Amino acid sequence: MSQNPSLQVLANAHLPVTIAPSVSSPRNDADYSAAEYGHLAGLPAARTLQLPGPEQELSHAEAMTLALQAARQGIRGANPLVGAVITDAHGHLLHVGYHRGAGTPHAEADALAAARAAGTDLTGARMYVSLEPCNHTGRTGPCSHAVAEAGISELYYAYSDDTENAAGGAAYLRSQGVTVHAMEEFANASYQLNERWFIAAAERRPFITAKSASTLDGFIAAADGTSKWITGPAARIDGHLIRHRADAVMIGTRTTLMDDPTLDARDANGERFEKQPLRVVMGKTEITENYRVRGLNPPEGVEADPQNFLQVFTHDPRELLDELYARGVRHLMIEGGPGMVGLFAGEDFIDEMVWYRAPMIMGQGKSAVYRLLVDTLAQAPRLQLDDLGMFPAVRVLGNDTATHLVPAPRGTAQEPGERRTLPKLDACHAPEPRLD
Ligand SMILES: NC(=O)c1ccc[n+]([C@@H]2O[C@H](COP(=O)([O-])OP(=O)(O)OC[C@H]3O[C@@H](n4cnc5c(N)ncnc54)[C@H](OP(=O)(O)O)[C@@H]3O)[C@@H](O)[C@H]2O)c1
């Protein structure tokens, strides 16, 4: 049986299907599994993937549908969600894999690892993968080579990966004698799953996760400025896990000056993870050395790390993103304040949003979002629930809820839509909140 509770064989306990167990602890790097994620934060277990029984001969469409479902077991961030299914030549399911996030094996490698662990002979086997196998060495090796070496004879993929560096996997596999089929009827499903990741890659900027924590009526601080703590410990731990996955965490100068956060990523016990995100401040007011985000005066037992801090002296989001992209940042978390969330939402740069809400009402205070010019309902950026195995759309965290959202689709694989930007603040009718 699978050691990973997020993948469950429902039909038959004697199935030969195996799934690679997760490989390492998130304490050390970005390797996450659903089990670890849930355990670490004391969160409910992730949704399970239902696998067919051993007698079932999967059609090509059924196998690709399963690969797309497996992809949804992953987590959003620097890399796309991808799933892979291996069947024998008759369509009997052998192995399933999916990508668990940056730094972990790609879906194809995950499924191949399960095959190796089980000693499965893959000669003549088929692989179904929701995205064309990559052809480059990034944080992991080229999947196209691994698939060919494993003896897979037929490869089916849903959507071509034309992104920089990754393209060319199908061509390589053909050159190695593998029969390759593009299943165009699934191209849009695969595209929709990762639309925002494709957009970020095409715009040569990091994938952006924005986080907010508010009362039910949308305030992040009371009228007198008090804001600690609106949400409870479980929601805060969850926010730290997102920081840990991101390459960089960004706030505006005002949040820095008012809250003096460390921006480090800590586990459920309050201990710093080994892997820390780059701490970024956006704005023109110089953040002096005494602020904790600079990393010069850490608490006892923590090493100073001033090199892991960056201030970008700009008001232009594109300039900030260019700077971070050039430094290799591929996943940026925006922690606030509300001006930053509004600024980036108004430019259609937010790719995913996690919104924590506490069961509290205030009637007045600091709004969770401003610097966003919406005059009429039709202009308001629309989001939709994003339900993933590792990151379900709605979670209960102690007394709070976390809602996981992505922007409404811009377009389709055939007709990618345009950026939906809003007018700049200069014309905004909403006043900036008081500073004091
Ligand atoms: N509950 C939560 O989730 C949460 C999270 C974070 C913060 N907060 C709260 O949010 C409040 C602070 O947030 P905030 O939105 O007022 O400040 P902010 O977003 O942290 O910083 C605003 C500053 O960013 C700079 N800036 C950068 N780009 C800009 C642009 N395009 N236009 C205008 N200014 C730009 C400006 O400073 P310069 O003059 O220096 O350029 C501006 O004053 C605090 O009360 C904090 O406690 C809550």
Image (tube, grey):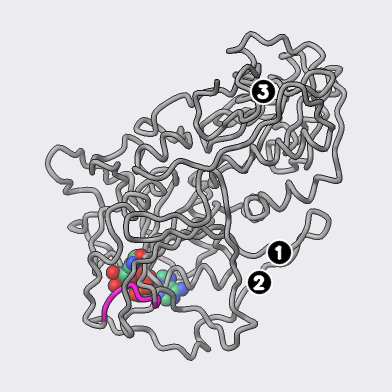
Where does the C terminus fall, quadrant-wise?
Answer: bottom left
Can residue 253 be seen in this snapshot?
Answer: no
Query: Label 2 belongs to which residue?
Result: 420
Residues under labels 2 and 3: Cα distance?
41 Å
Query: Label 3 belongs to which residue?
Result: 95
Dot 1: element: loop
**Badge 2: residue crowd in 10 Å (few <14, some 14–19, many ≥20):** few
Dot 3: element: strand
The residue lying at 62 percent from left, 12 percent from top is 116
Q: Are marks 2 and 3 in contact (CB under 8 Å)?
A: no
Outermost residue on the left side: it is 300
The residue lying at 55 percent from left, 47 percent from top is 76
Q: Viewer-nearest of labels 2 and 1?
A: 1
Q: Are marks 2 and 1 in contact (CB under 8 Å)?
A: yes
**Badge 3: residue crowd in 10 Å (few <14, some 14–19, many ≥20):** many
Image location of residue 317, percent across then percent down? 51, 65
The residue lying at 27 percent from left, 62 percent from top is 287
Mark closer to the chain start, 2 or 3: 3
Mark 3: amino acid: His
**Badge 1: residue crowd in 10 Å (few <14, some 14–19, many ≥20):** some
Question: On the rendered structure, is 249 left or right of 134?
Answer: left
Mark 2: amino acid: Arg
Residues under labels 3 and 1: Cα distance?
34 Å
Frontmost residue, 216 versus 294: 216
Query: Label 1 belongs to which residue?
Result: 410
Residues under labels 2 and 1: Cα distance?
8 Å
Mark 1: amino acid: Arg
Image location of residue 19, percent across then percent down? 59, 24
The residue lying at 53 percent from left, 82 percent from top is 373
